[in-house]
Image (spheres, rainbow, N blue to C red):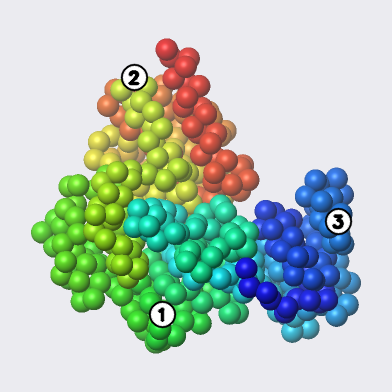
Amino acid sequence: MKNVNNFQNKTVIVLGLAKSGVAAAKLLIKLGAHVVVNDREDISTDPHALELSELGARVVGNGHPLSLLDDDVFCVVKNPGIPHSIPFLQKAVKKNIPIFTEVELAYLISDAPFIGITGSNGKTTTTTLIFEMLNQGEKQPLIAGNIGTVACEVAQHAREDNVIVTELSSFQLLGITNYRPKIAVLLNIFDAHLDYHGTREEYMKAKGNIFLNQTDEDFAVVNADDSDVSNIAANILANKVPFSTKQIVQDGAYIKDDTVYYRDEKIIEIAQIALPGTHNLENILAAICVAKLLNVDNKAICNVLSTFSSVKHRLQFVDEIEGRRFYNDSKATNILATSKALSAFKKDVILLAGGLDRGNEFDELIPFLQNVKVTVTFGQTAEKIEEACKKAGINLTVRVDNVEQAVKTAFDISSEGDTVLLSPACASWDQYKTFEERGERFIKAVLSLKKEMA
């Protein structure tokens, strides 16, 4: 860990006591900062808050009092999910107080270089593929970021011979100033989190921050098939490495004659790839670009691609019950993700969908509903999804209260040979804290149903 003295004897407010906030606060205390931890909830009995208090932090709960900013505050390190629109952060902006996310801290202290992966869809699968390829290639990778491991925790233990593979959300990328990945990956752009960013332009700008500090010594892996990605990357300084599923691209990864190539070098035949779904080919091509840039040999790449079949909550096969195959795609928090999931199945599908209402309609889903026999809906968007299903000619939709009920209902109305697919097309926050919790509830319900049927 680098000996950073930027925060020594400076007042830093850590906004939000989620796991990234706890990790950031502990690191800042270690770096000599005067830490104020602030959360909108009552955290007076929270064990993490008590621990931070014992370490010397000042802990303030039950809201975000603006008076905290009246002192000489060096910076705010905020939880990525807290929008910049709240009065507290608006006042910080007016006072020219920098607002970071903990990814910035991770970069400042890390001895290891970073690989940053972002995009509207496919981040976790691509991040995991890259990690596995580098691991097989003995490149000493560490994995961090939005995938579940807090980056500033990982960075504290990283060595110069490591490389930190980091999944990054648009929320995290809004809070960087110096973060500079050696390799940055931008997979795709689709309307997402507009309730947070306000406009599509602001969302794209946040995603583009992944290239912000790169120089001509760095690399940018970009989707040549996505016009928004191409526009974002048009004037960056990094060396562009394209990937495409539709065309042969120079100096990148592409598909020809049902075979994956990288710079005219044959890597693997598509038939040998274990990961299902044509949409995953984009993720695979992006991962291959990164692996080849870091000199991972083809044997290691092919070993991963021929054995890696899913990431939890991403088209994850859960079990089969009396001829019905159950898949958990809880990470599908927008229409594009669900569209791609539906495209992966050619047989009859019982679709389980619904969740947080962000104000959008679901007509864009209609072309992908041809193989859907029945839709089981839940959550705030149930009625909107049902309306899209009617337009698609699906005559039967069933509304239930939650994912657990949806599993039993789907089994009852399905037939042998059907696929039961949880792919909500919505965020989970109306009923569940995270998409992971939603997926775990689905898995538990499936396993309980199998036990009942035994």
Secondary-structure class at tag 2? loop
The disc label shown at residue 152, or none: none
Between residues 219 and 407, which one lies in front from this camera angle? 219
Secondary-structure class at tag 1? loop
Nearer the viewer's eye, disc 1 or disc 2?
A: 1
Residue 59 location, x and y as percent?
85, 59
Alpha carbons under labels 1 and 2: distance apart: 52 Å
Secondary-structure class at tag 3? helix
Q: Residue at x 19, y 55 (%)?
A: 268
Between residues 296 and 62, which one lies in front from this camera angle? 296
Please identify the quarter of the rendering in which residue 218 is found: bottom left
Q: Residue furthest top?
A: 454
The residue tagged 1 is 218
Residue 240 at least partly seen: yes
Alpha carbons under labels 2 and 3: distance apart: 54 Å
Query: Which amino acid type is marked by label 3?
Result: Ser
